Image (cartoon, grey):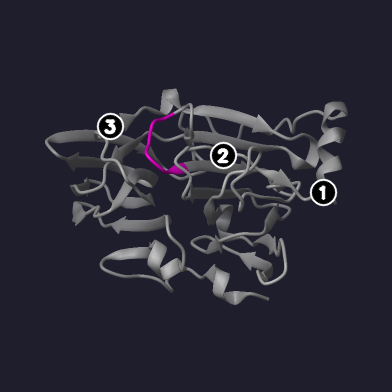
């Protein structure tokens, strides 16, 4: 198994971040992810450098200050309780994140060529998609996708999979630049309800690019996908699964185009005769009661 593609919780902690993945540490050119944990009343100031970034609450609320702007993020109790608002901050900027009540905040990043303006992303504007059917049903929160939110390179979505369902299926890839496929590096960051187990599969798409991952993942674990087929992401019975996908690549066009593994693409054709899992959506813009 390619263990170099799995980053366990705490393994990459650095500079006050619980998770710190850069293009350099991942061995590629564009995608990155940090997770910032703040105690009640805590604050962190950092430079974005060459990276554009989103500040996305995983739990808790925060104020994000950047270039004279201040954005109040209502956030959420957990990734399983609500669709969250977020803030976009550009490259070559200084950012301060402050949280009165404390919390955990994901910072997906992409190596950017253009500097855009800091902006607020309301939860109510996040496009929530129900994808698949039957036991391949899942919820996709398209908060930073082409067509839903402007960025230079960054593409980021949240996926929620009900217990015992599979998502990221059929297995697919996006490692070549063609008319039907985008070249995108991808990070999967996982949270599992009640810190249960889940599983992720990644495998090679050609000779000389060997990846063979079929690994148990838990809350705070991350899987790096430079290329190759990926999927399924498997939620075990009793445990809902969340993952944050972060993607970026070299194309001048910011686009998400994928190619299914031809051995399994036929599965999409079965969805027309199946209902979407009635447990979906798992979250909306209304906070669930604990």
Q: Nearer the viewer, residue 58 or 113?
A: 113
Q: Residue at x 71, y 61 (%)?
A: 205
- Count of picture labels: 3
Residue 187 position in % (x across, y down)? 51, 56
Q: Quadrant of residue 128?
A: top right
Which circle marks residue 256 in the picture? Answer: 2
Residue 252 position in % (x across, y down)? 44, 41
Q: Which residue is mark 3?
A: 119
Q: Which residue is mark 1?
A: 262
Q: Residue at x 56, y 56 (%)?
A: 194
Q: Residue at x 26, y 42 (%)?
A: 90
What's the magenta region? 149-155
Ranked by sequence position, the earlier of labels 1 and 2 is 2
**Lateral position of residue 245 relative to residue 59, left or right:** right
Tell me how far mark 3 sits from mark 2, CA to CA: 22 Å
Residue 121 position in % (x across, y down)? 35, 30
Ranked by sequence position, the earlier of labels 3 and 2 is 3
Ranked by sequence position, the earlier of labels 3 and 1 is 3
Q: Quadrant of residue 225?
A: bottom right
């Amino acid at each position: 198994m390619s263990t170099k593609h799995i980053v366990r919780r705490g393994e990459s902690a650095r500079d006050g971040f619980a998770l710190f993945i850069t293009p350099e540490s991942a061995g590629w050119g564009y995608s990155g992810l940090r997770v910032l944990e703040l105690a009640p009343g805590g604050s962190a100031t950092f430079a974005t450098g060459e990276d554009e970034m989103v500040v996305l609450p995983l739990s808790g609320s925060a104020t994000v200050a950047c270039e004279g702007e201040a954005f109040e993020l209502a956030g959420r109790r957990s990734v399983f309780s609500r669709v969250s608002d977020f803030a976009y901050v550009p490259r070559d900027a200084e950012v301060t994140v402050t949280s009165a009540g404390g919390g955990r905040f994901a910072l997906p990043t992409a190596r950017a060529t253009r500097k855009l303006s800091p902006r607020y992303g309301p939860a109510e504007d996040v496009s929530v998609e129900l994808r698949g059917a039957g036991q391949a049903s899942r919820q996709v929160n398209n908060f930073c996708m082409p067509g839903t939110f402007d960025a230079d390179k960054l593409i980021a979505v949240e996926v929620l999979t009900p217990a015992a369902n599979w998502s990221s299926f059929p297995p697919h890839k996006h490692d070549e630049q063609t008319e039907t496929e985008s070249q995108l590096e991808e990070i999967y960051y996982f949270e599992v309800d009640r810190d249960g187990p889940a599983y992720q599969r990644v495998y090679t798409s050609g000779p000389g690019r060997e990846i063979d991952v079929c690994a148990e993942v838990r809350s705070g674990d991350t899987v790096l996908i430079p290329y190759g087929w990926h999927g399924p992401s498997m939620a075990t019975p009793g445990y809902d699964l969340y993952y944050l996908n972060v993607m970026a690549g070299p194309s001048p066009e910011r686009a998400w185009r994928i190619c299914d593994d031809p051995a399994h693409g036929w599965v999409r054709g079965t969805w027309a005769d199946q209902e979407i899992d009635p447990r979906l959506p798992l979250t909306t813009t209304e906070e669930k009661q604990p």
